[in-house]
Image: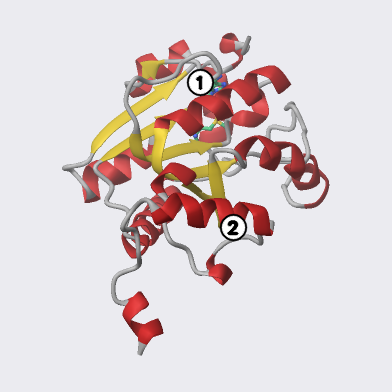
């Protein structure tokens, strides 16, 4: 069970206001623009977005401004954040949406869940995603080597990257820079566009694609010439 009360007004004030904030709306806007651009490049049309653990709602603000036609569902487990920022109250470890989304955003959330909750949340993210997942979850390595401890909430469940990869792998192919492609979308990736995959997984991906007409327009022509 997540500690919902932990995510109160003071939590958002500490982490999203003032000089020690984790990130700002303009920074997240640049990320959202990059993810949108990459989706278009990969041929994923973003019509519906699900965001889990949306907090201050910076992703939604970017989509409202730059992609107003996109249907956007923002959710969070914090009753305070839902009231203040207008999200649906949902716990991603127990809630699985009935429909699926072209883009699912889960930034800075899974590290707050215990192992059972995080594993269940990944299953729910997998079921909800029919295109791309943007995922950021701080790992044990990140705590040791990457994050600025003065500006980061380090009271988290620190797991290895391998722990996450093992649970994401049945649902997603890792692209990089936080992006994961839903296996069900069968997005044709050039070998060097994605993270290295075991040859068995590559064969499974090819088999999944063979049932669809998926190919990268233009770029397949280049290969043929
Ligand atoms: C570090 S904040 C990240 C907020 C936002 N995604 C961002 O990057 O700015 C973590 C957020 O995850 C939410 N959260 C924690 N556990 C959750 C759960 N089980 N389901 C949904 N949201 C959760 C918290 O309420 C909080 O808003």
Dot 1 beta carbon under 8 Å from ligand 1: yes
Residue 54 visible in image: no
Lateral position of residue 163 relative to residue 108, left or right: right
Furthest-bottom residue in view?
225
| Earlier residue among tags 2 and 1 | 1
Looking at the picture, does residue 209 appear above or below residue 120? Answer: below
Q: How many marks?
A: 2
Q: Nearer the viewer, residue 142 or 81?
A: 142
Image location (x, y in percent) of residue 159: 77, 34
Please, what secondary structure does the residue beneath circle 1 have?
loop
Q: Name the residue: 59% across, 57% down.
A: 202
Q: Check whether the beta carbons of the residues at disc 2 and disc 1 lie within 8 A of each other.
A: no
Q: Nearer the viewer, residue 33 or 6?
A: 33
**Image spot of residue 12 (x, y percent):** 52, 26
Residue at 62% of width from left, 42% of height from top? 169
C-alpha separation, residue under disc 2 versus residue under disc 1: 29 Å
Residue 87 location, x and y as percent? 35, 21
- The residue labelled by disc 2 is 202
Crowding at mark 1 (Cα within 10 Å: few <14, some 14-19, many 20+): many
Drawn side of residue 221 relative to residue 151, left or right = left
* Residue found 37% across the figure and 61% down from its top: 42
The label on residue 92 is 1
């Amino acid at each position: 069970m997540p500690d919902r009360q932990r995510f109160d007004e003071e939590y958002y004030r500490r982490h999203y206001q003032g000089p020690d904030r984790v990130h700002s709306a303009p920074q997240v806007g640049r990320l959202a623009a990059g993810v949108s651009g990459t989706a278009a490049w990969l041929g994923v049309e973003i019509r519906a977005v699900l965001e889990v653990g949306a907090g201050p709602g910076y992703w939604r603000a970017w989509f409202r401004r730059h992609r107003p036609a996109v249907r956007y569902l923002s959710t969070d487990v914090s009753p305070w954040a839902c009231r203040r920022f207008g999200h649906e109250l949902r716990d991603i470890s127990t809630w699985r949406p009935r429909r699926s989304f072209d883009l699912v955003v889960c930034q800075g959330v899974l590290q707050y869940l215990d192992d059972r909750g995080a594993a269940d949340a990944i299953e729910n993210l997998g079921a909800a995603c029919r295109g791309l997942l943007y995922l950021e979850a701080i790992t044990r390595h990140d705590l040791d080597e990457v994050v600025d401890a003065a500006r980061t909430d380090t009271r988290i469940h620190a797991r290895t990257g391998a722990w996450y990869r093992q649970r994401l792998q049945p649902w997603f192919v890792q692209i990089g820079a936080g992006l994961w492609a839903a296996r069900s979308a069968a997005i044709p990736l050039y070998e060097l566009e994605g993270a290295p995959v075991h040859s068995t997984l590559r064969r499974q991906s090819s088999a999944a694609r063979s049932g669809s007409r998926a190919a990268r327009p233009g770029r397949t022509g280049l290969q043929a010439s």
